[in-house]
Image: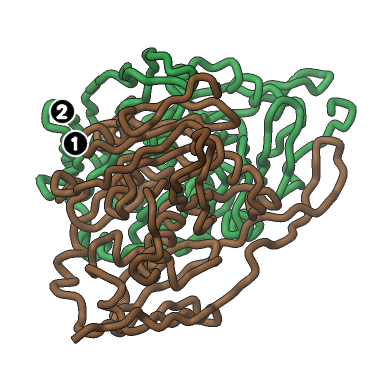
Chain colours: A brown, B green
Amino acid sequence: MTRGLPRLSSARAPLTREVEVIDEHGERGMVSIPAERDLTVYVDRRELVTLMTLGAQPELLVLGYLLNQRLIESAADVESITVDWDVNAAAVKTHAGIDRIEERTAKKVVTTGCGQGSVFGELMAGIDRLELPDTRMRQSQLYALVNAIRLQESTYKSAGSVHGCALFTLGEGGERGEGDARMHCFVEDVGRHNAIDTIAGWIAMQPPGQLEGGRVFYTTGRLTSEMVIKSAQMGVAIVVSRSGITQMGHEVATRVGLCAIGRATNKRFVCYAGAQRLVLQPGLA
Amino acid sequence: MTRGLPRLSSARAPLTREVEVIDEHGERGMVSIPAERDLTVYVDRRELVTLMTLGAQPELLVLGYLLNQRLIESAADVESITVDWDVNAAAVKTHAGIDRIEERTAKKVVTTGCGQGSVFGELMAGIDRLELPDTRMRQSQLYALVNAIRLQESTYKSAGSVHGCALFTLGEGGERGEGDARMHCFVEDVGRHNAIDTIAGWIAMQPPGQLEGGRVFYTTGRLTSEMVIKSAQMGVAIVVSRSGITQMGHEVATRVGLCAIGRATNKRFVCYAGAQRLVLQPGLA
């Protein structure tokens, strides 16, 4: 039996709110701050976890969370995800339940995040089995990608205090090797793991053949081990960050052959690992 | 019976490592990245959690973690904490065990952090019972504090990708109301929750009367709800951040009457909540 993609609700809620502040001149004014709400996830009526989220795309967040925690194997395992902001709940209905869910959610690893992120199960389990696609990126494509992020409208620009990430695919480029990087989705959240989970959920909802070309993941946050692992799990061989890398992120990237580029702003960057995937064009620097 | 403070080991490990990178000119060079290691915490020989940490002050981190998760009531509940980096383990020995530890670590709330931070127990439980001290801070003291952070030597300056935080106390100041803010400890970690937990551990190890004067907590990270709650739990009524605030951070700060100051760099800042604790000196702006 071939199962289709899950049905998702389209719950929406304001992404920012205005608050009164006082500045260094003693003057009162209004500024926007990002929304942040709790979303309790129930899987087949059993409470699983409470996520704190901006709330932009809660259904994709929940789907991606289940995937990245490896509680489900594919989106087709899920029949529906219904988010109701009146009660801050996401009801997940699966086709056949989640095997050994008690056991698989019992092991706590408090990871880096900027906080004490929780991944269930063995953080590193299975990373040696990951086979990454043969993606290569030209320096011009990297610049095109960074520029697309710069131009993107965002909650960050209006309210700050959120992390953003985006999924790109690389095209063949033109004769002169110019940039060609297409942004498919851009996600922001108060937690950057939420943001990457939402992208994983988005990918899982695409029909086959929709995402041609090498995938590149961009994040405003640091390249920590989980960011690298989650990227690799999404079939992404190149990650780009505005920020830097941690030691475990570096180790995992090196181990799986993932290209990790950090401090990427304007036309500057540092390639920490997997430089064989980066086609340098020094004339562009 | 009065119990003394716990005995702590003094485990040390390198805080940075050098990795080879390639830059936008195609040139190879070495850069420092922050260390990141796993530390599995065993309480009375029972595995509790694995923290990913820079590893600067692991014993204080573990102590503060237990306190901030409210698994212990005071440092005196702990007989010893022994960290061994050869096996990446922290052995916690308590005087009388931790009551109902299974039950109290069962509830997962995945919080903002920059990731999906885990706090055990009810995030908001008990915040209405918190009584904050009557701390007030002059604008000049805020500037002194921000300047002290600017001058601080740090892993961030050499390797980036870590969060820093610090605990200050405020003095009486001089006749002209000039700044007087004393930095007691400065902590960095790959996770900012680790950093604040380490400060909680440090506070818990101080003899009574050691920390006179109003306490101010500084963080490079965003003011999320847990950062605000953890600050309030440490008897801190004023928090200062280089970054912004999230909605839940704002709500909790407002509810407990905590002064939340963000975007604090050089002589600029925004006071999001609790402005009654801030003594403005508009001539200084």
Residue at label 1?
B90
Image quarter where the C terminus of chain B lies is top right
Rendered location of residue B12, percent (x, y)? 25, 20
Q: CA distance from mark 1 to mark 2?
A: 6 Å
Residue that protrudes farthest toward the right in the picture: B283
Image point 21% across, 53% down: which residue? B98
Confirm or deny contact between disc 1 and disc 2 (CB under 8 A): yes
Along the viewing direction, whichever of B147 and B18 lies nearer the viewer: B18
Image point 66% across, 53% down: which residue? A153
Marker disc for residue B81 = none
As displayed, is residue A68 above or below residue B73? below
Task: Kindly state the secondary structure of the residue where label 2 is placed.
Answer: strand
Please tell me which of labels 1 and 2 falls first in the chain. 2
Can residue A285 be seen by looking at this rendering?
yes
Q: What amino acid is labelled 1 in the image?
A: Ala
Residue at label 2?
B84
